[in-house]
């Protein structure tokens, strides 16, 4: 009975070690952010008020949707629907590109509002966390593009899709980190 | 398979609603213990939903599931405690 309700963790062990390392890295950044908040309460209380909350919220919706798209891609390949899977993977990539576009607009908007890395400690953390996350999105997009091409070549099937699951798990990790970043930087003050 | 698709769609909608409502609450109200608690609870729920349903960990056994779920209990708790003691 237990065998029918449990299955193996999606992806391979290497990607899970990477996911734990990334989550630990970001957790340490979040703790450093909270410690800095104690030392500069005014900067951390006023900082979010000047940020583009709309950009942050739109990027949250885009990343949540991208996680949904990649989950649908995994279910499609497991149902033997390779073409449908490829469609969902391209949608994931489009969502990643949209995220980058919104982030670019946000940084441009900040520049116009005279928000720079040197403005306050809060903005130094804001740029460090968001730019670091943006780099992870770009790495994730390269990974998703790689597995999309391999899926098109027919390298994955319903029975063997560990590589695809690994890329999907990494992409979900990027979404999980943003789920914490958005309220921490944009919402809570 | 159709049922799984429906479940994923429901989870996606719940995530969208939680994101919009927590942002709206924070925009409309001054920060207080209640607002911080609501937003941190939303973070914990959203993280668990992504891990369990979209990542597909809900039917897996062992470490990865519990590590991710613990992460999304401990981290929002630490954030809530840090922020509420400063308010």
Image (tube, coloured by chain):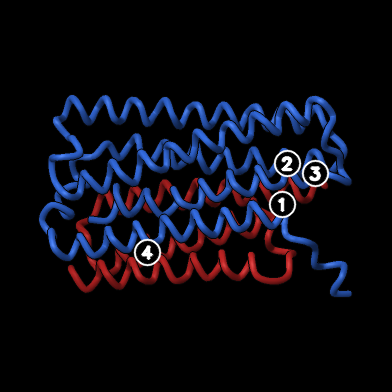
Read off the residue under disc 3.
Answer: A161
Q: Is residue B36 left or right of residue A14?
A: left
Which mark, residue B38? 4
Quarter of the image for residue A140 reads top right
Which mark, residue A182? none
Residue at the extreme left: A42
Q: Is residue A30 left or right of residue B17?
A: left
Quarter of the image for residue B52 reads bottom right
Q: CA distance from mark 1 to mark 2?
A: 7 Å
Read off the residue under disc 1.
Answer: A11
Element at label 3: loop
Q: Is residue A168 left or right of residue A3?
A: left
Q: Which chain wears blue?
A: A
Instruction: Identify the residue shown where x is 13% and y is 52%.
Output: A43
Q: CA distance from mark 4 to mark 1?
A: 33 Å
Q: CA distance from mark 1 to mark 3?
A: 8 Å
Q: Nearer the viewer, mark 3 or mark 4?
A: 3
| Mark 2 and mark 3 residues within 8 Å of each other at the beta carbon | yes
Read off the residue under disc 2.
Answer: A164
Mark toward the start of the polypeptide (1 vs 3)? 1
Q: Which chain wears red?
A: B
Rendering coords of residue B72 (x, y %): 49, 65
Q: Which one is in front, B29 or A58? A: A58
Q: Nearer the viewer, mark 4 or mark 2?
A: 2
Rendering coords of residue A68 (x, y %): 62, 42
């Amino acid at each position: 009975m237990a065998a029918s309700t449990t299955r193996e963790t999606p992806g391979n062990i290497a990607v899970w070690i990477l996911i734990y390392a990334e989550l630990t890295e970001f957790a340490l950044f979040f703790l450093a952010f909270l410690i800095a908040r104690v030392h500069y309460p005014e900067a951390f209380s006023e900082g979010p008020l000047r940020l583009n909350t709309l950009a942050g919220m739109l990027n949250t919706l885009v990343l949540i949707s991208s996680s949904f798209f990649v989950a649908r891609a995994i279910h499609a390949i497991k149902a033997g629907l390779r073409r449908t899977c490829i469609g969902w993977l391209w949608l994931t990539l489009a969502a990643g590109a949209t995220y980058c576009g919104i982030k670019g607009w946000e940084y441009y908007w900040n520049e116009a509002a005279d928000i720079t890395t040197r403005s306050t400690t809060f903005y130094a953390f804001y740029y460090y966390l968001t730019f670091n996350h943006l780099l992870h999105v770009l790495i994730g997009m390269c990974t998703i593009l790689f597995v999309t091409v391999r899926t098109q070549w027919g390298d994955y099937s319903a029975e063997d899709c560990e590589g695809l699951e690994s890329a999907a798990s990494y992409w979900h990790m990027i979404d999980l980190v943003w789920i914490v970043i958005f309220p921490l930087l944009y919402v809570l003050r | 398979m159709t049922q799984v698709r429906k479940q994923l769609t429901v989870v996606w909608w719940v995530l969208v609603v939680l994101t919009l409502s927590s942002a709206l609450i924070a925009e409309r109200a001054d920060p207080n213990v209640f607002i911080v608690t609501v937003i941190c609870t939303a973070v914990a729920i959203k993280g668990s939903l992504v891990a369990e349903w979209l990542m597909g960990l809900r039917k897996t056994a062992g470490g990865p599931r519990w590590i991710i779920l613990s992460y999304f209990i401990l981290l929002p708790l630490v954030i809530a405690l840090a922020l509420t003691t400063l308010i």
